[in-house]
Amino acid sequence: MPDIHGNLLSPKRIGIYLALAFLLIPAVHLFAETNTMLYAGYLGVLGFLCCFAVMPIACLGAEKLKLVDTPDEARKTHAHPTPLAGGIAIYVAFMVTILLNFHFSEEMKAIVAGGTLIFIVGLADDAVGLSARVRLVAQLAAAGLLVAMGVHVTFVPNWLGGIFTETVITLIWIVGITNSMNFIDGMDGLAGGASIIHGFFFGLVALLTQQAYMMYLAVAIAGSSLGFIPYNFRKTKPAAVFLGDSGATFLGFVLASFAILGDWGESFVDLAVPVLIMSVLIFDMTLTTVVRITSKEVRSIGEWLHYTGRDHFHHRLADLNVGKRNAAWLFFSVSVCFAIEAVIVLYAETTAALLVLLHSIIAFTILGIILVVSAPSRKDAKTVTVDKQNGSGGPHGS
């Protein structure tokens, strides 16, 4: 098992603890609040340091509780049993950051409560394995809590169903993005890096649209995710810790909630801003779903929920002989490119914005066709359907 805790009182770690303690001094906090950008930086660094500092302790606890991902010959090809502690550290870091620095609105209370439910269910899935049905019910419950407390899309006119249609769209969005983030957690650094990118661009758009509260939240989740990266996306060594279902689903849920919470503009086209920011997640889920249905690998929603395989976007990139690390960087690059288009849509006139959206759809379609056609035969890359009593197995399933 990778040893990431080592000496918890080494000079390096003592420096991290001192820096974290410095940021927690009330006078430092009050000074940071005097400037919007300074405060955003303060929250990001606080989230990073907290996650980085907590990680070794979280790993020790995960190992003692047997919260580890054990390699097997079928799907999990990492060399050593690896603690599923990344989600624990990110959850703690994000919660510490917001609890110490935010005045909670009803909407924020809903996101925290729903995110906590998602985290706990994910942790239970990491520990004992839960059926897909149980996980889906929990995700719907968390999404339903958001709707009940006012966090839902608000663009559907009454003649198209009004609040009923808005509720359905919200549930589909939250559950879809929550699972999509978990699905991409199949390669070192991928889900954590994607969360940093999504959080950064949500924060950037919030800054440009003068939504300081939204920017602070986005920076907090990006900083907390960044604290996980040194342990999971190492230059010369494999990951020393995995997110686990608890971390991947928590990040997906929180980011999906931010997409709904933010005010992205007044026109229908402006609604594409959060969609473009998270478009690679949507593309990955769409690609795998279409391929699995057309190839008759899945024939029902139940089979779709249980199915796992190596046919996701990042798997197909790696199969192009670029290597896993380069595949991750390509994934990040595509995410950044389409997130930049979200910023362009924010400022574009309606016609130009529609052309950008059309370009994005065409680009993803072409990319999907290239990946499916050029990738090697998937026969040796497919995996058996997961047992109904087990989850995706953490970071290297789905």
Image (cartoon, grey):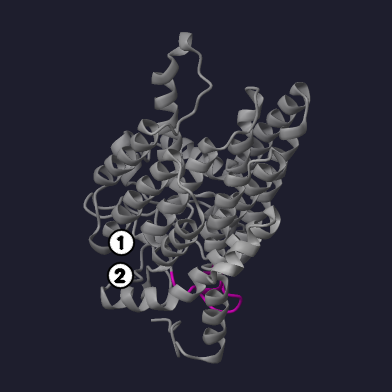
Residues at marks 2 and 1, CA–CA distance in whole angstroms:
7 Å
Q: Is residue 61 left or right of residue 269?
A: left
Q: Is residue 321 visible?
A: no
Q: Is residue 139 above or below residue 359?
A: below
Q: Residue at x 40, y 49 (%)?
A: 112
Q: Which span of residues is magenta-colored? A: 229-241
For label 1, the SS is helix
Element at badge 2? loop
Sort mark 2 into few (<14), some (14-19) or many (20+) by Cα contacts within 10 Å.
many
Q: Nearer the viewer, residue 119 or 280?
A: 119
Judge whether 100 appears above or below 272 on screen.
below
The reply, left or right, for residue 119 in relation to residue 29 is left
Within 10 angstroms of label 1, few (less than 14), some, or many (20 or more) residues? many
Q: Are marks 2 and 1 in contact (CB under 8 Å)?
A: yes
Which disc number belongs to residue 126?
1
Q: At label 2, which amino acid type do we have?
A: Leu
Which residue is found at the position 61% from the left and 69% from the top?
Answer: 28
Above or below, 8 against 339 in this view is below
Q: Name the side, left or right, on which 95 lies relative to 357.
A: left
Is 362 within the magenta? no
Q: Nearer the viewer, residue 285 or 96?
A: 96
Magenta stretch: helix, strand or loop mostly: loop
> For mark 2, what is the residue?
67
Locate residue 207: give its quadrant.
top right
- Is residue 236 located in the magenta-colored stretch of the structure? yes
Does 256 sit left or right of 115 as displayed? right
Q: Position of residue 22 (x, y in %)?
A: 57, 76
| Residue 278 disc label | none
